[in-house]
């Protein structure tokens, strides 16, 4: 990648210059990982990254980052969502502009102040409810047991707080993503 | 004499059995199923029995159909491989009734050892130590409470018919007993059709060590030393090594002696595994016996040079063991890595689909038992094991060094595998020291998969580059479109 002066991108045999009016953020769950600004790529701590890259096939890249070589594969790129595999590990990033990124950060803070719904990770039957309404719960504490694929799965509490509402009872059949319990 | 074998299994174990059969000049039959009509294992069969028209049953679970096919095709013997079928005494019995040789132990032994309560009684009679616990079934919660009050917490509630970690619950304190007792019993009832449970003291920090045994039908039994199987997730083994690095020579001798004694006492023959728990003070307790060839048998084959499937066939033939205890020596060290189609980052969820590319390096230290090649489909309806990488070398340090190289050189594309997990295990200090327990994954590992320094940022830069390229492409297309706008076209047409 050549970020100097103009941003040049190889497409097959031709080199195309594109204009980037705003800084671009590569974001993973609302946290910026790298930023492209002023024709330079910096990491989350604002350190400039030395980059060189080679493209082996439409989806395979060899990247030298600060002198170290990595090979990666782009699994999918849909709009601004890109999934990349490096060393067998999968990473999913959103590419955001300065504006869209700050809007998302704002939404995330608003959402975190609301109560949290715990939903069924897979379809099955509720075999037991382990907590009561109004009970204080710790993060990681089992809330209920869900039987699916002949296995009893514990539904764990994602945050510490208080049980606001229990929306199912023992013996209920639930669908995937059905809301089971509300915690705040 | 066995001249033909029906291999009633699929994937890597079917291929592994067929290799030995071929070497011994035995004809092999395998099932072509609708779930996996283009499977690799079929290429290793001399004859294929097409059962793909039957889309309602899983042939590998259907004892009657298997035995009927064996009779119809006049096949001498049935090898069940590993899994549920191999531990179903009804298969061994049905084979015997129809005059077909079952390659495995007698159905009586399968039945006795498959019942944890009876197996425990047999161990006590053979003077093999067992974990303190209820002798027999605990029929009600009231009984459970009385018993646990007498031995103290923590305890484990286990299904009599259980296995593979199902129908088991650990109870840390009195308030949890009722819920956990019910959960274990209900789960056992749904899975095994038998809700009976028993209770044992729970050993907080155990190691899972097992002894490979081999017996013939003339009362001879030998052991082929131990395997370390403490690296487990939800009671499922992920990697195994032989011999165990955490077992002293004295303890090894004791474990092997107890395993052999148990087999003598029960008249056990064929290959089998006696599983023990070893606590922090190096006390060992009999846990259960597996009456089959196991997934991890290649590590024992690697260190002893004995082909266990060949021995199983010979024993089924009624031959006397051709090897005696003094012939069997530990010749090195071996580790098996179970390459499962699972996404470790997403909490080991199954990752089925098409294997776009699969390659293992040619290395004389590596035995790669694979059920798949590039282009094959990993079906969602079976277990997730796709291949086993077994690395052997004279010393454990060499095995670890070679394993690091080999795991880096195995390439799998299209599906996710457990390889990043193994790479991380190979950097974990307690593993390198050979001193680890069954809580290894939760307690000793800093993260579940190997991450290279900077790879996260590298991945983000690649995403950025792919995005910019796509954007540049779009801009080019837009310019191109402007030139061939339908309005322009129209004006040309006029």
Image (tube, grey):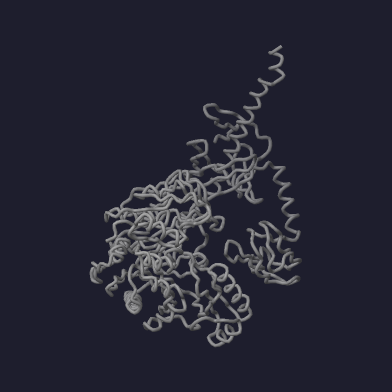
> Residue sitting at 55 percent across and 55 percent down?
B345
Name the side, left or right, on which A118 lies relative to B209: right
> Residue sitting at 57 percent across and 68 percent down?
B190
Count of labels in the image: 0
Q: Quadrant of the C terminus of chain B?
A: top right
What x and y, as percent, mark residue B118? 44, 79
Name the side, left or right, on which B475 lies relative to A168: left
Nearest the eye: B49 or A79: B49
Vertical side of A101 occupied by A139: above or below: below
What x and y, as percent, mark residue A144? 66, 68
In the picture, residue B9 is in which quadrant? bottom left
Nearest the eye: B426 or B17: B17
Vertical side of B48 occupied by B428: above or below: below
Nearest the eye: B126 or B472: B126
Vertical side of B325 occupied by B457: above or below: above
Q: Quadrant of the N terminus of chain B?
A: bottom left
In the picture, residue A80 is in which quadrant? top right
**Can I make out residue B378 in this image?**
no
What x and y, as percent, mark residue A137? 69, 70
Nearest the eye: B216 or B442: B216
**Can I make out residue B92 in this image?**
yes
């Amino acid at each position: 990648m050549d970020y100097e002066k103009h941003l040049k991108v190889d497409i097959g045999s031709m080199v195309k210059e594109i204009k980037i009016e705003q800084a671009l953020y590569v974001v993973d769950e609302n946290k910026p990982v790298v930023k492209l600004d002023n024709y330079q790529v910096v990491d989350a701590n604002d350190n400039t990254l030395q980059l060189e890259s080679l493209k082996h096939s439409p989806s395979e890249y060899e990247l030298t980052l600060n002198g170290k070589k990595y090979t990666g594969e782009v699994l999918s790129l849909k709009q601004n969502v890109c999934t990349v595999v490096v060393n067998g590990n999968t990473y999913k990033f959103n590419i955001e502009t300065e504006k869209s990124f700050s809007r998302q950060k704002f939404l995330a803070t608003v959402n975190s102040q609301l109560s949290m719904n715990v939903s069924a990770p897979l379809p099955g039957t509720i075999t037991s409810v382990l907590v009561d309404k109004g009970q204080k719960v710790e993060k990681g504490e089992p809330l209920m047991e869900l039987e699916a694929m002949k296995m009893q799965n514990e539904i764990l509490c994602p945050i510490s707080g208080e049980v606001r509402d229990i929306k199912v009872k023992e013996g209920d059949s639930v669908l995937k993503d059905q809301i089971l319990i509300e915690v705040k | 004499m066995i001249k033909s074998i029906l291999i009633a299994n699929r994937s890597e174990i079917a291929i592994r059995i067929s290799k030995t059969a071929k070497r011994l000049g035995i004809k092999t039959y395998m099932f072509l199923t609708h779930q996996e009509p283009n499977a690799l294992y079929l290429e290793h069969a001399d004859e294929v029995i097409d059962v793909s028209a039957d889309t309602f049953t899983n042939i590998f679970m259907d004892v009657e159909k298997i035995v009927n096919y064996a009779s119809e095709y006049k096949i001498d013997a049935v090898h069940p491989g590993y899994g549920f079928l191999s531990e179903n005494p009804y298969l061994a019995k049905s084979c015997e009734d129809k005059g077909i040789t079952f390659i495995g132990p007698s159905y009586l032994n399968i039945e006795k050892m498959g019942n944890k309560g009876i197996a425990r009684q047999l161990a006590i009679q053979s003077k093999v130590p067992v974990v303190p616990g209820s002798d027999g079934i605990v029929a009600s919660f009231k009984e459970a409470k009385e018993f646990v009050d007498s031995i103290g917490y923590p305890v484990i509630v286990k299904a009599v018919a259980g296995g593979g970690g199902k129908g088991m619950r650990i109870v840390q304190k009195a308030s949890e007993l009722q819920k956990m007792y019910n959960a274990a019993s209900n789960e056992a009832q749904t899975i095994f059709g038998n809700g009976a449970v028993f209770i044992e003291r729970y050993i907080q920090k155990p190691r899972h060590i097992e002894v490979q045994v081999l017996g013939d039908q003339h009362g001879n039994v030998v052991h082929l030393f131990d395997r370390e199987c403490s690296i487990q997730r939800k009671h499922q083994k992920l990697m195994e090594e032989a011999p165990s690095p955490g077992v002293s020579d004295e303890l090894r001798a004791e474990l092997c002696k107890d395993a052999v004694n148990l087999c003598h006492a029960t008249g056990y023959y064929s290959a089998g595994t006696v599983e023990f728990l070893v606590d922090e003070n190096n006390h060992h307790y009999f846990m259960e016996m597996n009456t089959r060839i196991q997934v991890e048998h290649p590590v024992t084959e690697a260190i002893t040079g004995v082909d266990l499937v060949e021995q199983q066939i010979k024993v089924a033939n009624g031959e006397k063991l051709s090897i005696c205890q003094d012939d069997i020596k530990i010749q090195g060290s071996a580790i098996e890595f179970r390459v499962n189609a699972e996404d470790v980052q997403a909490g080991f969820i199954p990752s089925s689909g098409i294997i776009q590319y699969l390659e293992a390096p040619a290395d004389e230290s590596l035995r790669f038992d694979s059920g798949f090649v590039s282009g094959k489909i990993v079906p969602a309806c079976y277990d997730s094991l796709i291949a086993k990488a077994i690395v052997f070398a004279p010393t454990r340090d060499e095995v670890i060094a070679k394993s690091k190289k080999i795991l880096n050189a195995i390439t799998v594309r299209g599906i996710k595998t457990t390889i990043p997990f193994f790479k991380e295990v190979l950097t974990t200090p307690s593993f390198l020291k050979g001193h680890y327990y069954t809580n290894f994954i939760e307690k000793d590992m800093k993260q579940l998969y190997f991450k290279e320094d900077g790879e996260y940022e590298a991945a983000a830069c690649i995403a950025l580059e792919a995005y910019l390229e796509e954007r540049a492409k779009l801009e080019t297309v837009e310019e191109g479109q402007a030139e061939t706008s339908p309005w322009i076209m129209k004006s040309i047409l006029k």
